[in-house]
Amino acid sequence: MLIMLRRGSTEQDAQQVIGHLAWGEMAASQVRHRGRRLVCLEHALALELQRWLQENCPQVERVLDIKTPYKLTSVEYQSHASEVVVGQVRIGPGHFCVMAGPCAIESEDQLDRTAAAVKQAGADILRGGAFKPRTSPYSFQGLGLEGLKLLQRVSRHYGLPTVTEVVDCASVEVVAEYTDMLQVGARNMQNFPLLHEVGRAGKPVLLKRGPSATLQEWLLAAEYILAAGNDQVILCERGIKSFDPTTRNCLDLGGVAAVREKTHLPVIVDPSHATGKRSLVSPLALAAAAMGANGILVECHPCPEQALCDGAQSITLPQLLELVKGVQTVVAALEEMHHSTERHFAYSAQERELPSLAR
Ligand code: PEP
Ligand code: MN
């Protein structure tokens, strides 16, 4: 349940509503969303109480009966698709976004060569990890602050906005200072203090799906960020755990289609972590484009055999060029299909109109 307060309502107005609900032993919290104060309740509110609030609290504008546990994230709250803006790049309806770059930033030369190819390929956003969440404590953990500085310098040179992972609350501020979008990694999807913190950082957030998270858990994780005041959130499917070790994870494209029916947030696909295999990245990137995802996040490297992290799933720079051409072709074909369907329906509607016009 969401209780929307009128514009200009104060903290006191919100606390008064929360106080009334507390009488009924209902826990409610206040959130700020696009300049509005909202009182959110996990459960439904009896009709009589809804009416009572509307009649007795002038600050209450509307009571929205949103049934899903996630509220601000849901299509019931907002039916039109959201757009997220990263630097000059718009992610959402009408534009398929390609984010590409190395798994980890290793050196200026590696990042510079990669960024040049990302730009040349016509991709939109440069990715690169400075703080790496690694399964083993003995693996390369990233260049840290030095990596962030390299990312900023190189990306500015090529005019590309950036995305990089933030692994803990303590580094949110510094990561937000050097990059355009904060990535919350799969392993951190349910790190609730981190979600809250990135919700307050004032930068767009790329939220990966946890390897064993349900769609509802994923959307509730996004809800934490929105509830903290940040509606610039992109969801990223990167494969979930499966019984088959052939691929690193199992890309849940069905889940992407399903989650897009539930949320207005843009949803992109990471075919690199989903497969763990270079040869499988392109087919799944094309599949993501064909099924209407809002974009892809791809790992690439000037010399994948020498990569310090995720080399086996990193495509080469010439492969990136081909991949971007391929997804652009698929996206254009999909658009043409939508247009011709629209034309077909417009034409059939006209045909249906004709007899009545003749009369
Ligand atoms: C990454 O994008 O480099 C990464 C670590 O991804 P994930 O959190 O999906 O494993
Ligand atoms: Mn990686």
Image (tube, rainbow, N blue to C red):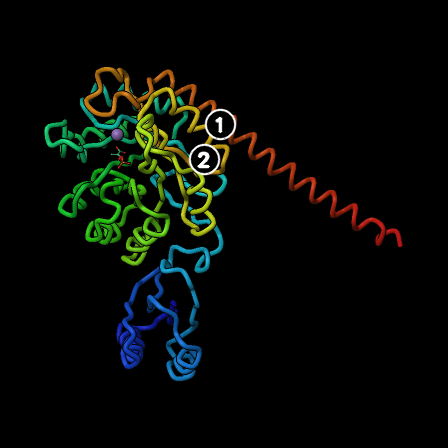
Task: Give percent across and percent down for residue 3.
Answer: 38, 70
Q: Can residue 206 be seen in this view?
A: no
Name which residue lies at 21% across and 27% down: 105
Give the CA distance from mark 1 to mark 2: 8 Å
The quadrant in which residue 302 appears is top left
Asked which secondary structure carries label 1, the reply is helix
Q: Quadrant of the C terminus?
A: bottom right
- Quadrant of the picture in which ligand 1 is shown: top left
Task: Give percent across and percent down for residue 188.
Answer: 23, 44
Q: Which amino acid does label 1 sit on?
A: Gln
Mark 1 is surrounded, within 10 Å at the Cα level, by few (under 14), some (14 to 19) or many (20 or more) other residues, namely some
Q: Mark 1 points at which residue?
A: 328
The quadrant in which residue 254 appears is top left
Q: Which of 208 and 115 is in front in this view?
A: 208
The quadrant in which residue 184 appears is top left
Q: Mark 2 points at which residue?
A: 96
Mark 1 CB within 8 Å of ligand 1? no
Q: Which amino acid does label 2 sit on?
A: Phe
Q: In this view, does 255 lie to the left or right of 223?
A: right
Task: Give percent across and percent down for residue 43.
Answer: 35, 68
Q: In this view, does 322 lie to the left or right of 126?
A: right
Task: Give percent across and percent down for residue 116.
Answer: 32, 21
Name which residue lies at 37% across and 19% down: 279
Report the number of discs. Answer: 2
Q: Nearer the viewer, residue 258 or 111?
A: 258
Q: Which of 98 and 47 is in front in this view?
A: 47
Q: In which quarter of the image is the N terminus?
A: bottom left
Mark 1 touching mark 2, by CB under 8 A?
yes
Name which residue lies at 46% across and 43% down: 257
Q: Which of 251 and 105 is in front in this view?
A: 251
Specify which label sits upstream in the sequence, 1 or 2.
Answer: 2
